[in-house]
Image (cartoon, grey):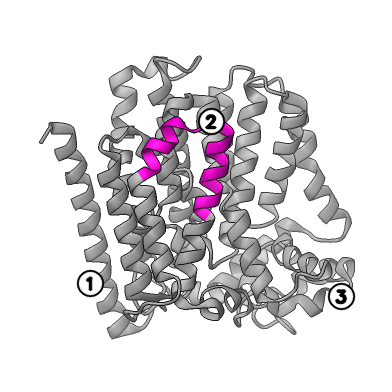
Amino acid sequence: MNRDLLRDLGAVLAAALLVVTAVLVGTAIQRDHGTLRVNWPPLAANWLPHIGPGTPAALAVAFAVVAYGPRLAARLPWRALLGAVWGTAMAWTFSLALVDGWQRGIAGQLTARNEYLRVIDRFHDIPATLRDFTHHILLHSPDNWPAHVAGHPPAAPLTFVLLDRIGLGGGGWAGVWCIVTGATAGAAVLVTVRTLAGEALARRAAPFLVLAPAAVWMGTSADGYFAAVAAWAVALLALAVTGRRPRTAGFAAGLLFGLTCYLSYGLTLFAMIAGAVLLLGTGRLRPLPYVIAGLAVVPLAFTLLGFDWWEAYRLLVTRYHEGAGGVRPYGYWVWANLACTALIVGPATVAGLRRAGAAPVRKGLRTCLGAPGPSAEPRLALIVFAALLALLAADLSGMSKAETERIWLPFVMWLLPACAFLTRPRAWLTAQAALALLLNHLLLTSW
């Protein structure tokens, strides 16, 4: 066994110990004080071993990706690879969700008590609702919004309002929307990696962007949809700053970044990932006027319609501390959130992150910037660690205490490409699939 592999296994063992510690300490805190507000810390889940109609499909997809994924990723034409990643990610996510059945796994998720579809009827007059939105954020306000609606800017519930208006109403269509759009996030990440760090690393990362334990939650919450919007914003920015249609791609990137900030307040931290993309781009600042123009569109539209983003966020902070956020102990969640992240990225990503940390040292930090080629690995490492920095900032903010298995999905998608640094991909893919299947079949997750 070579030294690198031993170090990889050491990193995985350290992550496993962190998870076990979080489970044991969290279980004791929840049993004695009830302040964690989750039943199987650090995840919002219940221990309930079960199988379901999605089990055979999930096993089949896992076997196919492990057996053929690395070979196909290396040989398929690029556009065919992007389509394959999207299609396989959909199959994997649908099958995992259907382990809990259609109603529990897909159709019922976004109709639950705190979810977006509970407020569809309150948006019959959209401009009036947006003007009045901030008046219903606080818990003591009249007709206060459900937790997820209050906790997000109105582009999140508006998405499902608009789906309802075009005839795709109800939890089934909402769940399908989140899975189909969320599955495109992996393709967006691949486009970015290829553009900034070369095609070889992108192809090596492709199977891991499909077979991630994070898929357990990608199909059961709107955060998978948010992850896709944010991922395509980054991908388009990468295309713009490398001189590929800087005007069109730059404007579209700005438009999606603006939408991202109006889907989730916390995704403003994607500015860190965008900064890494700008740093790595060969054109760098040339597309910025078009990016800024696109970025202004969504905020301007919502502001003209009467929604005040900053006031809403200020009220959300108050609402957060009025509810579970004010009870959940920061001293536990500030590190247990990282244990939760280790579970959703899987052991392969943990090992990949260790190797990513060594890449700039191995290749020379000064070669990180410039054309892909000899410096491809440190360039990919920079993207990955920009996402990790954004995730750590979210953690330290104290606004993400628990439930990060879904809340941090947009950031997690950018940690998965670290798996491109690994050798023996089939063994690591097997570990990823096994963890995802165990989590989905042993626990009944809240999402």
Residue 398, visible in the rendered structure:
no
Give how far across and how far down residue 169 sits, in percent.
75, 73
Residue type, mark 3 in image: His
For discs 3 and 2, the disc positioned in front in the rendered view: 2
Dot placed on the residue nearer the N-terminal end, 1 or 3: 1
- Which secondary structure lies at badge 1? helix
Instruction: Kindly identify which residue carries mark 3.
Output: 124
Q: Nearer the viewer, residue 408 or 50?
A: 50
Give how far across and how far down residue 347 sits, in percent.
29, 50
Dot placed on the residue nearer the N-terminal end, 2 or 1: 1
| Residue in the picture at 61% in, 71% down | 148
Magenta stretch contains residue 57 = no
- Which secondary structure lies at badge 3? loop
- Which secondary structure lies at badge 2? loop
| Residue in the picture at 55% in, 26% down | 195
Residue 338 vs 23, above or below: the answer is above
Q: Toward which corner of the image does residue 37 lie, by quadrant?
A: bottom left
